Image (cartoon, coloured by chain):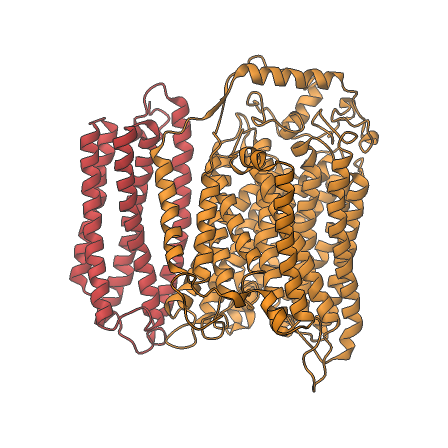
Amino acid sequence: MSENGLYPGLNLGEAHDDAHLQAESTVFGFWVFLMSDLIIFGILFASYASYLDPIGLAGGPGPQDLFDVKSVAIQTAFLLFGGVAYGGVSLSVKYEQGRAKLILWLLICAVLGAGFLFFEIKDFISQAGEGGTPQVSGWLSSYWLLVGLHGFHVFSGILWIIAMIGQISTRGVDDVVKVRLSMLGVFWHFLDLIWVGIFSFVFLATLT
Amino acid sequence: MSGETSPIVGNLDWNVTPYTDLLKHVDSSTIVGAGAASVLVLGAIAGLVLFTYMRWWGPLYRNWLTSPDAKKIGIMYIALALVMLARGIIEGFVMRAHQAMALGTLAQKESGLVAPDHFAQLFSTHGTIMIFFVAMPLLIGLINFVLPQQLGARDMAFPVLNQVSLGLTAAGAGLIMISLLVGQFGTGGWTMYPPYTGKIFSPGEGVDYWLWAILISGMGSTLTGMNFAVTIFKERAPGMHLMRMPLFCWTSLCVAIMLIYAMPALTVSSVMLALDRYADFHFFTNAAGGNMMNYANIFWMFGHPEVYILILPAFGVFSEISSTYSGKRLYGYTSLVIASMSIAVISFTVWLHHFFTMGQSAGVNIAFGIATMIIGIPTGVKIYDWMATLWRGRVRITAPIVYLTGFFLLFVIGGLSGIILANPSIDYQVHNSTFLVAHFHNVIIPGVLYGMLAGIHYWFPKAFGFRLSETWGRRTALLFVGGFIFTFMPLYVLGLMGMPRRSPTFQNPDFMPWMYIAAFGGVLMLCALASLCWTFWTSYRNRRALAVPGGDPWNGSTLEWSTPAPVPEWTFPCIPRVKAREDWGETKRRGDPWRSPETYTDIEMPANTAHGLLIAGASFTLGFAMVWHIWWLAILGVLAIPGLVVLRGMRVIEPNIIPAAQVEEEDRRFRQQVASLPPATRADEETERNRGVPDLSEFAG
């Protein structure tokens, strides 16, 4: 089944050549979409860097005043463990461990993602309370947009997980659903990747 | 517009239409504004009446709006683009007419046909429409129609996504159109540079119309780019190696890659500007750490590749037609492939030449100036390749060849003025003058417009089963060439005389002779538009005489000419096995190209769906609600889009199966018809003897 070396975890069955070809296009298309998305983040990272100077800060609060590295570390843990948990989803699909287990793993991912969002939003609220709203300076605008967009992606990922749970319960784990789960996996790990960038570049680099 | 925002209708009230302006104050400017709105309203009413009277709504919905067929989506894109083209050309004419009367004095500065603010709206909508809603839909439409057929594929990789892309583009175009009637458009030009377009200097709905039209249609273009790329990489017929693809497919691949990488920059700059305007962020404001130069930077990171997104499909068309209409193989295939890809890559390294005067160091300017000049090299290679293709061929002077000749003459001039502008020290002298206006029209009109019109003329029979009138096609082409020369050559002179672009008025009487020439050119452009419409109409009336059921009216050599005209929904009765570059030509050379396939199988086609239409409706609603601050409606629009996607995901969607028997019957009928039709020689190509079956003995290329 996987002698063509494509997406070995998908488990679309021996005789499903067409399904495999279609899956190949679909998953490849999703990778292309993420490349495009990555450009958006790339430009936002560059903008963040360009606003990170005294002019961009415009006398408002800076990284040292606003960032709480402990909370950021907790967020990182939630998100990365969420990524690990998605491995459970992929394995359940691969070894056909049944709907219940699959949904359980998806729920774990969603909960870990929600935990990340909880701490992130808590941070945003406390930063706003300390005078760090995006309306204060160019740097804060770029910070809120970059980190906020990543948070929005996580939120969309959670919605997607819920939609997938809905699909698994109504239509079962058919080929289409398996391909979608595989794309969701790519997306979910992509968010980890972006976060590694944000964590190092937005938080660590400015705090050192 | 009143100061208060109503919770129900937002900022909308009865004072937003141009009719209220006309009632308040009657002058030529408000008459033009109300006239344009009336054309829109009357056009819409006429369309509604026509469709109802002819009972076209059902067929329109079933056969077109809900169709995921890339060919039909392509035709709809082109139809949209032609409607927008009509508006764009008329706006261009109004601007020319205005400037021909705009000579003011120091005492009385303002004169002319329209008010300065109205003039600013005109050049802003003209630019926005021509780039985003004429050029883009034209090329995306043409690629949609041609690409799968040339690759030997039945459809795009993601047919429904394709439909969604069309819907998003149409929603953006709808927002631009409705701005004629409801409210004002922005006055910041097609680039909408802040801080002028920020909230402080441009309150009101104008810039927001632009922002939402761009954000929505830009999303559609990004998705289209992905669709093209995946189609080219994954959906080629067996044996269609990359280096066997027709050149048009190669340029489509370049376009796809550039859309994927360039459109996000536009999305980012527009989102940032929207946040500045709606939520008081400080990306591009003057105060609080904003930096407007960042806007120019990010915008042109998109904007420059965009220029080549526009031009490369035209290069693809010229590659096809220069070969077909000269009956020769394309000269220098490999060099054309390398040149196209080089242009695609280098186009990402030159964006800074759009703001040489922004204040960066001379070293930076020089680096980008040199990169800009380097792009001229692959472009030059292409021009020579096409000329070498025509050299000693049996060239038929058809309408596309007239466009090609006009392109050769004019595009080279435009390219050379580009090389002049690429020199930063010269750019300092002529930037922001009509010299620049002349330059970019000089590359975009002969490049994009001629290329796309030539492509439409070339592939029209494949779509509708009859040729376009060559006589009227040539007249249209000549009018567009003449119209271009008279309209824009004077602008070079005016620019060197020191006339700034976008001037609603000026005080130098020496400008006037050139202004009159340019206005005459504007009249010619209007005639060209009328002639284009007439070409379609007269060809439709003579469709029996012009019919080419054999499907190969130009003795072509690429796969799309092997099928009937009009091409059936499934395109190929069985997926071709490609054995050579220009496979159809090779098949002809071997003799008996119309052999029927040995077996027929059931064909799976994507089922019709209203998904794209619903997404288009939701995004138009979202855009319109955001422009007018109707928050409840905007929230509904925001929720509707993911809601529609999720609902569609829950359903198991069965494809539409076309039984083998039906395919076999239609295919056999086509092959019998081909056998019964008399072959036409190239000399007979324009006459009624051309029924779409070429004389194979003449096929040399």
Give chain B's shade: orange
Quarter of the rendering containing residue B274: bottom left
Q: Residue furthest top?
A: B598
Q: Is residue A19 above or below residue A208?
A: above
Residue at 25%, 28% (x, y): give it. A94
Direction from residue B256 to residue A40 in the image, left or right: left
Residue at 79%, 68% (x, y): give it. B516
Q: Position of residue A131 (x, y in %)?
A: 25, 73
Quarter of the rendering containing residue B525: bottom right
Q: Quadrant of the C terminus of chain B?
A: top right
Direction from residue B254 to residue A124 in the image, left or right: left
The red-tinted chain is: A
Q: Is residue B254 above or below residue A15?
A: below
Which residue is at the front of the view, B578 or B575?
A: B575
Quarter of the rendering containing residue B368: bottom right
Direction from residue A187 to residue B41 in the image, left or right: right
Residue B339 appears in the figure = no
Q: Is residue A82 above or below residue B114?
A: above
Residue at 29%, 69% (x, y): give it. A133
